[in-house]
């Protein structure tokens, strides 16, 4: 049963990749700051130095996969019943985050970088 949950999660997330995310970020190279903010919204952080401006966007979430109850089989041996647990697993949670920073020079996006385990796109 656990394999089926993992398979569903893989199928839902299988198309989203870090390569897809990098391609999405690269599409903003040459965009104006206004175009970036219109697409991504206001940044969570900004920093300026030596004529460069850095806009940082952050996201985080916790995902949960519910557990699956086990099945039990009972075998009779003479007058004694033996019950054995079969399958099942406890629930799981995972923390997901992504931090993306765009570098701008003279109001134009010149590069971007990211870090985290949830920076994926199709």
Image: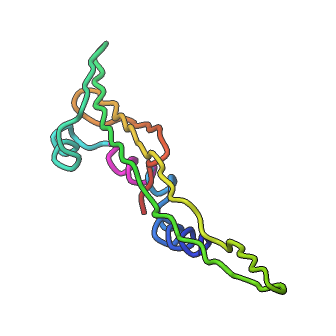
**Furthest residue toward top:** 50
Q: Residue at x 32, y 38 (%)?
A: 58
Is residue 39 found left or right of 88 in the rendered image?
left
Q: Nearer the viewer, residue 36 or 97?
A: 97
Q: Quadrant of the N terminus?
A: bottom right
User: For residue 4, what is the image quadrant?
Assistant: bottom right
x then y, percent, for residue 98: 40, 42
Q: Main secondary structure of the magenta part?
A: helix
Of residues 61 and 33, the one nearer the viewer is 61
Q: Say how many tags the image has.
A: 0
| Residue at the (46%, 61%) spot, across then down | 65
Vertical side of 24 occupied by 68: above or below: below
Residue plotted at (44% across, 38% down): 114
Please, which residue is most extreme toward the right here?
A: 78
**Residue 11 image point, x, y percent:** 51, 72
Q: Is residue 69 left or right of residue 76?
A: left
Q: Residue at x 59, y 64 (%)?
A: 89
Name the foreground residue: 110 vs 21.
21
Percent x, y for residue 111? 39, 36
Q: Is residue 101 left or right of residue 7?
A: left
Looking at the image, what colour scheme do you see? rainbow
Q: What quarter of the picture does the C terminus occupy?
A: bottom left
Q: Which residues are magenta?
A: 22-29
Magenta stretch: includes residue 25: yes
């Amino acid at each position: 049963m656990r394999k089926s949950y993992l398979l569903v999660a893989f199928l839902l997330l299988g198309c989203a990749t870090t390569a897809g995310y990098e391609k999405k970020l690269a599409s903003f190279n040459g965009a104006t700051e206004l175009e970036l903010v219109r697409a991504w919204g206001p940044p969570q952080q900004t920093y300026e130095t030596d004529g460069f401006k850095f806009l940082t966007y952050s996201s985080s979430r916790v995902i949960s996969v519910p557990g699956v109850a086990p099945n039990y089989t009972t075998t009779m041996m003479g007058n004694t019943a033996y019950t054995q647990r079969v399958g099942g697993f406890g629930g799981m949670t995972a923390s997901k985050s992504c931090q993306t920073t765009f570098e701008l020079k003279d109001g134009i996006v010149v590069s971007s970088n990211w870090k985290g385990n949830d920076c994926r796109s199709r």
